[in-house]
Image (tube, rainbow, N blue to C red):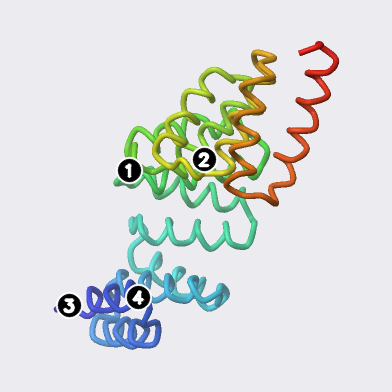
Amino acid sequence: MDKNLKGIQFLQEGNVEKAIQMFAEAIEENPHDAVGYVNFANVLISVGELQRAEQFLKRAIEIDDKASAAYYSYGNLYFNKELYDQAAGMFEKALAIGPESNDLQYMLGMCFVNLGRNELSLPYLQRSVELNGEDMEARFQYALSLARCGLYDEAITQLEIVVKTEPDHADANYNLGVAHITAHDDVKIAQTYFQKTLDIQPNHLLAGNGIKLVEQLSEEKGQ
């Protein structure tokens, strides 16, 4: 088996030392192949050695400036440093080169979420969900961005899919409660979702506050 593939296999198994060994040997045997440098960088990113990882990614791009995987990994590196503008730039380069992927679209969307640009995050998160409808984290984040943009009914639709697929997703249940009370002033449905959240996660502070809020609103309405 190719040493890059062996290294990836070791990494998936959690054997970081063996993975590093395989990628180091792959680089030694093929010093002009960008793949080994990208793989080595990914291991370093996974263990928090971001400065070393950056050197390998720079080398990968020097060897092949069309190495989409190198830009994607560079984006992850910047994202981990909370440098979201730079991360978005790297992810956009990866997307321009291709291929398109659910993960790439998701990470681009999350860059804009962290930059407070929810309107820019929407198309990327939506595309991520289109590419992989089973990715519930992407769908959940897409729903949150919809809600932040005031598109509550669309957010409710997405959150309902999440809780149907993952009934114990506490934050999805909580945000369904928020969306129903914000968009439709529906105190009873909101209370149901807040209580479900607390059943799943008893220490969910926001849901606890939500319960108090709906009880207060119910009293004011005489319900």
Look at label 1 and name its amino acid: Glu
For the residues labelled 3 and 2, say whether their Cβ atoms are less than 8 Å apart: no
Please state, as top left, top right, bottom left or bottom right, where the N terminus lies in the image: bottom left
- Per the model, the C-alpha gap separating discs 3 and 1 is 25 Å
Would you name the residue on which mark 4 appears? 11
**Horizontal placement of 111 versus 221: left or right?**
left
Furthest residue in direction front, as rendered: 223
Q: Is residue 59 above or below residue 122?
A: below
Q: Position of residue 56 (x, y in %)?
A: 44, 74
For the residues labelled 3 and 1, say whether their Cβ atoms are less than 8 Å apart: no
- Per the model, the C-alpha gap separating discs 1 and 2 is 14 Å
Q: Nearer the viewer, mark 1 or mark 4?
A: 4
Look at label 4 and name its amino acid: Leu
Residue at disc 3, secondary structure = loop
Would you name the residue on which mark 3 appears? 2
Would you name the residue on which mark 1 appears? 100
- Answer with mark 1 or mark 2, whichever residue precedes in sequence: 1
Please state, as top left, top right, bottom left or bottom right, where the C terminus lies in the image: top right
Q: Is residue 116 above or below residue 220?
A: below
Q: Nearer the viewer, mark 1 or mark 2?
A: 2
- Dot 2 alpha-carbon crowd within 10 angstroms: few under 14, some 14 to 19, many 20 or more: many
Would you name the residue on which mark 2 appears? 109
Q: Is residue 177 above or below residue 40?
A: above
- Answer with mark 3 or mark 1, whichever residue precedes in sequence: 3
